Image: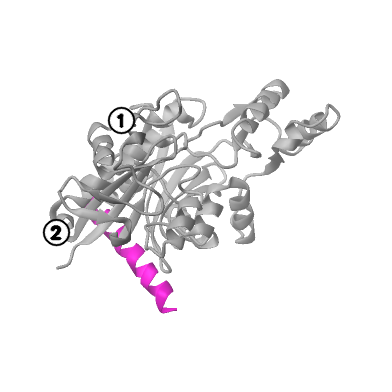
């Protein structure tokens, strides 16, 4: 059986660089297990925090250590003068297994770049220009899945229920003293307190704040504007946080549903990535009718943004009224062995190595279908 060469692309310039490394370590391990090892050769490709594509030897060093390459005072890594450094237009390098690779020989790419410049359609556009199959959504699905405002518009068009929200531009926040107070007045009138202020294009709860007063609202808007020019403010509701994983292309399937519980005020960055700060309950203890409706809505959301391969869809479940609101879709969710997405599929009967294998197969399948059409 001919082996496929998988380009494992990880790291990146976003604030989720370290999360990407953890995901890549788990995926690399899965590709080297059992039947996968006979089917795939891995070429790890690391994008350091300066945006430089590094050789597979250096990429393997990061995978082995779990630590990013450190930047120098000039904003580059110490390895950037290395003649084996990759160029975006092509490279030839010696892999850790001693096999010669060039990017044109990669059969399928597995980008696991979380956050901006990774899951927002930028890298997906590059790989599309390279005429290469890759795991996950294309340009449209990735872009819609990344921008919370565009995502909400797509969900509204699909008839999916959402909490009330207000879309804000940075220019409104940094406007003159007459306009800004009116913006805050409008937010208070439409949403009330508490509400949540979020940068539209960041993940992992970066820059998100829960606010309960005018002073906190103004501070949170200013902080969110430092991260992104587009901001969304959402009404706060008393609800349980339920998540569902989706796998597939044109005929996607939904996993069992899971629930996240935590003692903090909301599911912020620290809670998300501090061991023991949040608990995952799979399957979620909800009525079967609620679980089934969430699975249906997860697939509807997947189709609404034209996602492909994988996605995790997050919901709010108001137990008192049995209402379900869609929160967001993540087209490139965390992929460590303890992340919600692979754990949901594990409880649905799909092991981590099998899940990774299916995603690679789905990428190749989608690529071939696009070429045949």
Q: Secondary structure at mark 1?
A: loop
Q: Which mark is residue 38?
A: 2
Q: Residue placed farthest to the bottom in the image?
A: 373
Q: Nearer the viewer, residue 118 or 98?
A: 98
**Image-quadrant location for residue 183:** top right
Q: Is residue 308 visible?
A: yes
Image spot of residue 162 (x, y percent): 61, 49
Q: Residues within 10 Å of mark 1 (few under 14, many from 20)?
A: few
Contact? badges 2 and 1 (CB < 8 Å): no
Horizontal side of 188 relative to 143 (left or right) equals: right
Q: Secondary structure at mark 2?
A: helix
Image spot of residue 293 (x, y percent): 48, 57
Residue placed under numbered mark 1 in the picture: 67
Horizontal side of 91 relative to 207 (left or right) equals: left
Q: Is residue 349 magenta?
A: no
Quadrant (top left/top right/bottom left/bottom right) for the N terminus: bottom left
Image spot of residue 159 (x, y percent): 61, 60
**Image-quadrant location for residue 22:** top left
Q: Is residue 365 magenta?
A: yes
Q: Nearer the viewer, residue 10 or 349?
A: 10
**What residue is shown at x 21% (from left), y 45% (from top)?**
29
Which of the marked residues, 2 or 1, is nearer the chain's N terminus?
Answer: 2
The Cα atoms of the two marked residues, 2 and 1, are separated by 28 Å
Q: Nearer the viewer, residue 303 or 195?
A: 303
């Amino acid at each position: 059986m001919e082996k496929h060469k998988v380009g494992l692309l990880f790291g990146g310039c976003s604030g989720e660089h370290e999360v990407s490394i953890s995901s890549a370590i788990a995926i690399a391990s899965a590709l080297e297990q059992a039947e996968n090892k006979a089917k795939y050769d891995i070429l790890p490709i690391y994008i350091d925090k300066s945006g430089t594509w590094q050789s597979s030897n250096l990429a393997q060093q990061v995978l082995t250590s779990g630590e990013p390459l450190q930047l120098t005072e000039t904003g580059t890594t110490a390895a950037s003068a290395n003649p084996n450094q990759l160029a975006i237009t092509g490279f030839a390098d010696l892999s850790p297994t001693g096999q010669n690779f060039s990017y044109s020989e990669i059969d399928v790419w597995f980008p696991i770049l979380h956050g901006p410049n990774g899951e927002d359609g930028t890298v997906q556009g590059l790989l599309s220009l390279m005429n290469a199959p890759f795991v996950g959504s294309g340009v449209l699905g990735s872009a819609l899945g990344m921008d919370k405002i565009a995502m909400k518009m797509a969900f509204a068009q699909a008839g999916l229920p959402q909490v009330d929200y207000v879309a804000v531009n940075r220019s409104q926040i940094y406007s003159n003293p007459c306009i800004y107070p009116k913006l805050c007045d409008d937010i208070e009138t439409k949403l009330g307190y508490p509400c949540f202020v979020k940068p539209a294009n960041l993940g992992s709860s970066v820059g998100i704040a829960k606010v309960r007063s005018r002073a906190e609202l103004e501070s949170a808007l200013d902080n969110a504007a430092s991260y992104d020019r587009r901001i969304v403010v959402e009404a706060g509701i008393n609800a349980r946080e339920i998540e569902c994983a989706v796998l597939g292309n044109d005929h996607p399937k939904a996993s069992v549903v899971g629930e996240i519980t935590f003692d903090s005020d909301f599911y912020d960055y620290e809670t998300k990535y501090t061991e023991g700060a949040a608990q995952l309950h799979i399957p979620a203890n909800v009525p079967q009718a609620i679980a089934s409706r969430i699975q249906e809505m997860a697939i509807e959301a997947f189709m609404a943004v034209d996602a492909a391969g994988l996605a995790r869809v997050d919901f709010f479940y108001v137990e008192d009224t049995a209402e379900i609101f869609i929160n967001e879709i993540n087209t490139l969710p965390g992929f460590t062995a303890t992340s919600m997405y692979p754990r949901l599929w594990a409880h649905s009967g799909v092991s981590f190595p099998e899940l990774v294998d299916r995603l690679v197969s789905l990428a190749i399948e989608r690529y071939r279908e696009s070429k045949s059409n």
